Amino acid sequence: MKKQVFRVDSDGFNGAWYPTKAQSKKGFILMLGDSSEDRMAKTGAKWLNQQGICVMAMSPDKKDYGHHSYPLERFGKAIAFMKAQGCEKLGVVGASTTGMMALLAASYYPELSLTIAISPPDFVMEGFYRDGKDGATERPGDYESSVTWQNKQLPFLPYAYRHPEYWQKIQEEAKAGGDKVASRKMFEESERRHPVGEEERIRVENIHGKIICIGAEDDVLWDTCKYIRRMEERLAGLPHDSAFESWLYEHGTHFAFPESMLKMMLPVGSGLLVSFMFKAGKEHKKECRETRIDIDRRLRKALAAW
C-alpha cells in the first residue's frame, strides 16, 4: 500500500498515512519532526512499519513549524481514519514537545492503549512560533497555549521571557554549555516564577493501557527526568488503570531515540547528529549509544508484546 497524504483542510489537519504492506491491525499516531513528510517522520514511520504497525504521521500546519493552539481534536480525526482502515489497537508516540502532545492526546482519547513519550514535560507548554521574526529562530506567542480543546486554550506554564529575550536567553545558555541549543535554565526560571499548578499538569491518570516515558539526565532542553518522576509520583497518589514505565538514563541527551531508527535516518555516522547538537553527546558518545541501543531493544519488545 502507498502512502496517503492529507493536506491541511478546513479542520487544519495535516498528516500522512504510512500503512504496512500487509494491512496491520495495529496503528500508531506518530508526531516526530517538523512535518508529517519530513525525514524524521518518514524514518519513524518506516521503523514502526518494520515492527508491523501502520502509522499516521501528524504535524502542525506545514507552513509553520512552531507549536501553538494545536487542536487535540485532530487526534480524534486520526483515530477515526485508522479505525476505518481496520486498526483495532491504537497507540501514540511523540518526542520533546510532541511527547507532551502524545501524553495529552492519550489523556483525552481512551482508544489509545500504548503511549510512548520521549523527553516529555509533564505540563502543558506555552505555544511558540518559528517564523523568523526579527531574526529569531523561535519566539513565544502572546501568552498562547501550545494546545486547545473544544476551541479553548488549555492552561499552560508561561515562559520566563518574552520576545526577543526568549531566544537570546536560549542562545546564551547554549553557548555557555557548548551546545547548539539549550533551554533547561529557562524552564527552571519559568517554574521559579510560575510554579506548575494543577491546571497546567497533564492528567496522566486519565491515560489507559501502557505509558512509556523515556528520558536522560543530561538533557539540556529541560529536566525531563524530573518531569517523568513527577508523573510517576502523581499516578502513585491517584486512581488509574494504566501501567507506567519510566526509562531513565544518565546519558542519552534530548535525542533518546532507538539506535536503529537513527541509523535508518543517517546511515553513515548515526551518532554524529547527537554529537553535533549536544556537548554531552560528544563527550559521552559510547554511553549515549548504549542508551539508544537499550531503548531500541526495549521498545521493540514492548511493541511486540502490545
Image: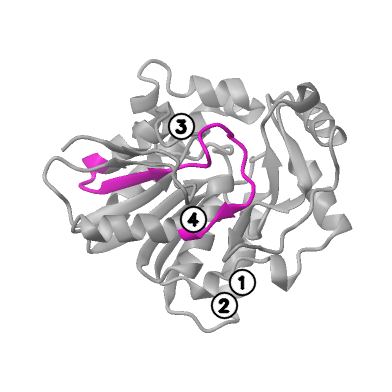
Of the two numbered discs 2 and 3 in the rendering, the one whose residue sits closer to the viewer = 2
Mark 2: amino acid = Ala
Give the x, y percent position of residue 93: 42, 51
Q: Indicate yes or no whether the magenta region holds residue 50.
A: yes
- Residue 289: image tag: 3
Q: CA distance from mark 2 to mark 1?
A: 5 Å
Mark 3: amino acid = Arg
Q: Residues within 10 Å of mark 4 (few under 14, many from 20)?
A: many
Q: CA distance from mark 3 to mark 1?
A: 29 Å
Furthest-top residue in view?
Answer: 268
Which residue was labeled with disc 1?
233
In the displayed structure, 118 sits above or below 175; it is below
Residue sitting at x 36%, y 54%: 78
Mark 3 touches mark 4? (CB < 8 Å): no
In the displayed structure, 91 sits above or below 53; it is below
Q: Main secondary structure of the magenta part?
A: loop
Q: Which residues are magenta?
A: 49-73
Which residue was labeled with disc 4?
102
Of the two numbered discs 4 and 1 in the rendering, the one whose residue sits closer to the viewer = 4
Mark 2 touches mark 1? (CB < 8 Å): yes
